[in-house]
Image: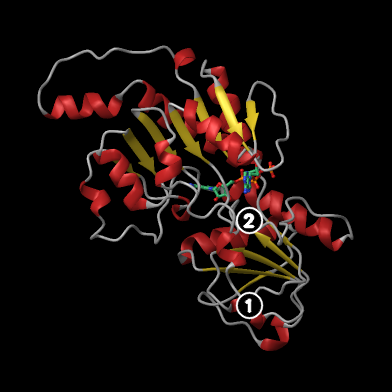
Amino acid sequence: MRFALLSRLPQRRVLLWQELLSAALDGAPVLLGPPHDTPDPALREKVEVLFVADPPPGSFADWPSVRFVQGLWAGVDGLLADPSLPPEVPLARLKDPAFAGVMAEGVATHVLSLHRQLHRYRAQAALRIWQPLAQPQAAERPVGILGMGELGMAAAGVLASLGFPVMGWSRTGRPVPGVEIHTGEDGLAALLARSQILVNLLPLTDSTAGILDRARLARLPQGACLVNFGRGGHLVLPDLIEALDSGRLDHAVLDVFEPEPLPQESPLWEHGGVTILPHVAAVTDPRSAARIVAANAQRFLAGQEPDGLVRRDLGY
Ligand code: NAP
């Protein structure tokens, strides 16, 4: 009994993950932790690997023999915020090419929609206005991507293939073919100044929280659009609303919020300059992901370095 799964996802989804993980682990049993089951302490003490997807806060303390924690999602900000996560235990996040492809599809969908001004035609249609708008070419619409990791790189490839000039911002400035890479505060300012559409795919860390604030949004070209697929904590909402109301920004597509679900009383629901998505930019497919995380756990147990290890000092 080496494996357990901790998640607050609905039971139907947790049972599917459990079945797929067990199959990918050559039939090894996978225990479920609360809220779906409360295994006997004698069994819990044998568990060495925890698979986690939004586990109940504080739940790591109940698994004293754990040697490896494997996230089922790409983001780890929620896991790192849990003080019960033992600091010495290696933590890996999901790195799934199929998932990156789904995110790239989501980014392309919304960048194309903004580029072809669907939000404006929807507003015109509501008023029965038949009015063609001037339409720039994709080559005239530079797109900036914050975060050039697994997801940013996949999105950049698809956008470049559609003809958009693509710029990327990362910490280390690792080169990405076909993408103009920027780093540091100066690089961010340069990227923002030319991004007619800005896509955020950063992890939420101490260095990136609140990064999309009034000063940064003010650097974007007049009439720019924003796609926030990173985390709600990256974006200062009152600053976004001010930028939209003043006409500096044209439209924002928001998939992530702080908190989630977006509260009923949020002014965003009524704001015509915002498209709200319920955190669906890319949803993990358990069929591909279970195979990948199970193989990663087996790599760890065989004494090899797992893929996607999180650097705790950097927060991603
Ligand atoms: P990743 O592979 O770890 O890539 C993170 C990227 O951000 C890297 O390029 C990294 O730079 C850059 N970065 C980190 N800190 C930075 C800083 N301080 N300054 C500049 N660049 C910085 O992560 P990923 O798999 O692409 O996922 C990115 C994020 O997407 C996740 O953390 C999560 O927040 C979000 N996400 C959202 C959804 C959704 O449905 N909306 C789904 C999955 C994930 P280096 O390359 O130099 O390291």
Whichever of labels 2 and 1 marks the residue nearer the N terminus, that label is 2
Secondary element under disc 2, as helix, strand or loop, is helix
Whether residue 269 is situated above or below residue 224 in the rendered picture: below
Disc sitting over residue 267 in the figure = none
Q: How far across and down, in percent of the image, does residue 299 sit?
A: 83, 55
- Above or below, 181 against 313 in this view is above
Q: Residue 147: percent from the left, percent from the top?
A: 59, 40
Q: Is residue 200 left or right of residue 100?
A: left
- Name of the residue lying farthest toward the right: 303
x 65%, y 82%: residue = 62
- Which residue sits at x=54%, y=75%? 57
- Read off the residue under disc 2: 20
Residue 226 is situated, as x and y percent measured from the top left of the image, at 41, 36
Asked where in the image residue 101 lies, by quadrant, the reply is top right
- The figure's colour scheme reads secondary structure
| Residue drawn at the location 43% of the way across and 44% of the way down | 215
Q: Nearer the viewer, residue 145 or 53?
A: 145
Task: Name the quarter where the C terminus is drawn.
Answer: bottom right
Q: Quadrant of the N terminus?
A: bottom right
The answer to whether 47 appears left or right of 267 in the picture is right
Answer whether residue 104 is visible to the viewer in this image: no
Residue 184 visible in the picture = yes
For residue 84, the mark is 1
| Kind of element beneath mark 1 | loop
Question: Which residue is rendered at x = 42% and y = 12% of the image?
Answer: 137
Q: In the rendered structure, are the residues bearing label 2 and label 1 in contact, judged by CB atoms less than 8 Å apart?
A: no
Q: Amino acid at mark 2?
A: Leu
Relative to 39, residue 277 above or below = above
Q: Give left or right: position of 178 versus 256.
A: right
Report the Cα–Cα distance between label 2 and label 1: 27 Å
Mark 1 residue crowding within 10 angstroms, few (<14) / some (14–19) / many (20+): some
The type of residue carrying mark 1 is Ser
